[in-house]
Amino acid sequence: MDTIELLVMGFQVLFSHPESLVYCFIGVFIGTLTGVLPGIGPPSALALLLPITFHVPSSSAIIMLAGIAYGAMYGGSITSILVNIPGEAASVVTCLDGYQMALKGRAGSALGISAIGSFIAGTLTIFGLVLVAPALAELALGFGPPEYFALVILGLSLVVYLAKGSAIRAVLMGALGIFLGSIGQDPMIGTNRFTFGNVGLMSGVGLIPMIVGLFGVSEVMLNLQLSINRNVYEQKLTGLYPTLHDIKVSILPILRGSVIGFFMGIIPGMSVMIPTFVSYIVEKRVSKRPQEFGSGAIEGVAGPEAANNAASVGILIPTLSLGIPTGASTALILSGLIMHGLQPGPLFITKSPDIFWCLVASLYIGNVMLLILNLPLVGIWVKLLKIPYSWLFIIILLFCLIGSYTVNNNMTDVFVMLGFSVLGYLMIKFDYERVPLILGLILGPIMETAFRRSLVMSDGSISVFVVRPVSLILLCISGLMVLAPMILQKGLAKATE
Amino acid sequence: MVPDIRVKIHITAVLSAAALMMFSIFICYKSLHLGIGTFSMPGPGFFPLGCGLVMGGFAILEVLVSLRGRVKQQPQVFSKNVCFTIAVMLLWAVMLERLGFMFCTFMFIALLAKRVGNQPVPIALLLSVAITACLKIVFDVAFRANLPTGILF
C-alpha cells in the first residue's frame, strides 16, 4: 500500500472508533490547558495522565498523549500574549512581540495569527511526518546492534550537548539514569540486579511513579516557593480573525517557521524552545522593518508560533520510527507506548500500522480541534487564567498521588513517587538536569542489550563499534557533543580570568 | 591595584558530587559481585560496572570543578510550605489504606488549602468536600480505579 492509501486507512480507523476522537479532544483540551496555566508544562501533564491511560485502549491513549504534547504549544501562546508570562517554555519568544501587540489593542490579531500559524505549521509538518518517518524506519531496519548502540549514545550525547547547565552534571545524570534502568532482571540472563530482595524491584524501578515524581510533584514544590502575580488582560478580545494585510505579512514567516521547527525537532535532545528562537532571529534578519521587532511585529509572533508547533510534530519522528525519544515529552509518550505493549522503533510502523496511521490522522484532526478551541473559544481560556494557583496545586498533587497508587494498587509506588519528587526538587534547586536522567532510564536497557549483543556477535571484540562505518560516525559525533561544551566552558572560564 | 577576590567553595555542589562519587563506588562494588563475565560473554554486572565507572569519573571531575568555583548564593532548599506539603503527602500515603480515600483526601485538601493556600476555614472545608466528591467520581466512575475504602468510608 502506498503512503496516501495508508493515510486514508488511518482516517478510516480513527472515524470507525469514535471514542478515539473523544480522547483526541481530551488530549488537545488538556494540552491547551497545560499551555495556558503557568506552572504546568507538557511533561508534567503527561506524567499526571500516564497512569490514567492504563484504563484506556492503546490507540486512544497514544492519541491523547500526543494531543497533550502539541496542544500545549497552542495554549502557551495565549498567556504569552495576554499576560506576558509564557505558558510553557516554547512560548517565551511570543512574549516579545505578542504582549506588545496586546498593549496596542491588537491582542485579537496576535491570538488569531498565532492559532492560524500553528494550524498551518501543524498541517504541513504532518505531511512531513508521513514522508520522513517511514523512510527513517526503513533506513533503521538495516541497523544492527552496534549501530543501535551508537545511535542511543548519540541521542544521550545530544541531550548533554544541549543541556542548559553543566555538561558534566548532565553526563552524571545520564549515567545515573542508565544505572537505574539496569535495576531489576538482567535482560539476557535473568539474574536479579540491585533488587536487595525486594520483589517489587524485580521488574525494575517503577517508571510511572518516577516520572510523576520527577516532573509532576517536583515542579509543584518549586512553584510553591514562587509567587506568580498575573495581570490578566481585562479588555474585550476583538479582531480574532486576521486581516488580509496580517495574512500577507505572516504567510512567509509561518512557512519558514514550519521548516525550521520541523527539521530542528527531529534532532534528538532538541528542546522545542530552540527552533522558536531561531525562527525569531531569521524573521528579524529578513524583515524590511527589523526595528519593529520587540514592539509588536506580527512576524515575531507568526514565525515562532509556527516553529514551535512544527517542532512538536517533528519530535515524534525519532520517537516513533527509531524508538529514541528526544526529550521529556517524547520520553513520556514512549513510556506510554511501552506500557501498552507497543514497541516504537523501525518495526513499529510495519507491525502496528493501524496505530501509527491512526495517530497520524489524529494529529490532523487534533489540529482542527485546536484551531476551533483557540479562535472562537479563546474566551474560555482567558477565564481559566484567573484560577488561583492556591487551589490548582492541590488538585495536581492529588492527581499525582492517586495516579501513582492506581498503577498497581500498591503503596510502594506512591512512596517511590514521593522519593523521586524530593530528588527531582533537589535536582532543580542544585542545577542537575532531569531530562538526561529520564532518557538514561528509558534508553539504558536498549543500550545495554545492543552493547552486549554486539560483543557476543563480535566474540568480545570492541572494534565492532569502529569497523562499521555508521556506528563509527555516530560515536565520533557523540564524542564531539560531550567534549565540546566542556572544552568551551573551560575556554570561557580562562578568558574571563 | 588588583581587587582581592575571595573565591569560596560552592559547598553544596561539592557535597552533591561527592555523594554521587560514593554512590558510584557502591555501584562498582556491587557490580563486581554480580559478575562481569568476559568481553565475549558479558555478565550481569558488566554494564552497571561501566555506568559506575563513568559516574565515578565525572563525579570526580565535578568535585574538582566545584572546588575551583566561585561563591554562589545558597538556594533556599526547603521552605515551610514545601516541607508541610511533603509531610501531608506522606501522611496521605501512610493513612490511605487504613482510613480510606474519602477521608484522607478531604483532610489532605483542607490542610493544604488552609496552611499553604491561606484559605479561610469555611471555604477550605466546603471546597474540600466538593473536590473530594468530584475526584471520587472521576477516578471511580470514569477511570474505574480501585480506591480503598478503609475503616471509615
Image: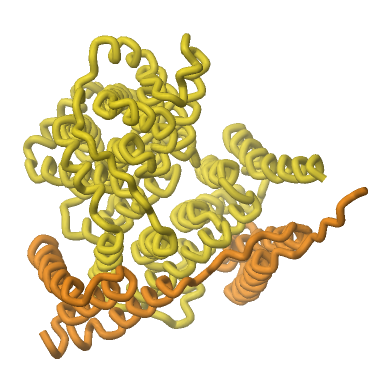
Along the line of sight, the residue nearer the viewer: A179 or A97? A97
- Residue that appears at 17% across and 59% down: A55
On screen, A447 above or below A126?
A: below
Residue drawn at x 83%, y 56% as measured from the top left: B5
Report the colour scheme: by chain
Picture residue at 30% right of the left edge, 66% below the top: A397
Q: Is residue A70 visible?
A: no
Query: Which residue is painted at 48% across and 52% down in the image?
Result: A435
Residue that protrudes farthest toward the right in the picture: B1
In-image side of A391 versus A485 (left or right): left
Q: Quadrant of the N terminus of chain A?
A: top left
The x and y percentages for residue A92 are 43, 38
Number of numbered discs: 0
Q: A134 above or below A202?
A: above
Query: x%, y% of residue B26?
Result: 63, 75
**Residue A484 falls in which quadrant of the image?**
top right
Toward the viewer: A86 or A171?
A: A86
From the top left corner, tell me how far across and down residue A203 is, in percent. Answer: 38, 69
Residue A302 placement: quadrant: top left
Q: Is residue A383 visible?
A: yes
Residue sitting farthest toward the bottom:
B151
Q: Nearer the viewer, residue A163 or A319?
A: A163
Residue A324 x %, y %:
44, 44
For the C terminus of chain A, which image quadrant?
Answer: top right
Nearer to us in this view, A182 or B65: B65
Q: Which chain is yellow?
A: A
| Colour of chain B in the rendered structure image | orange
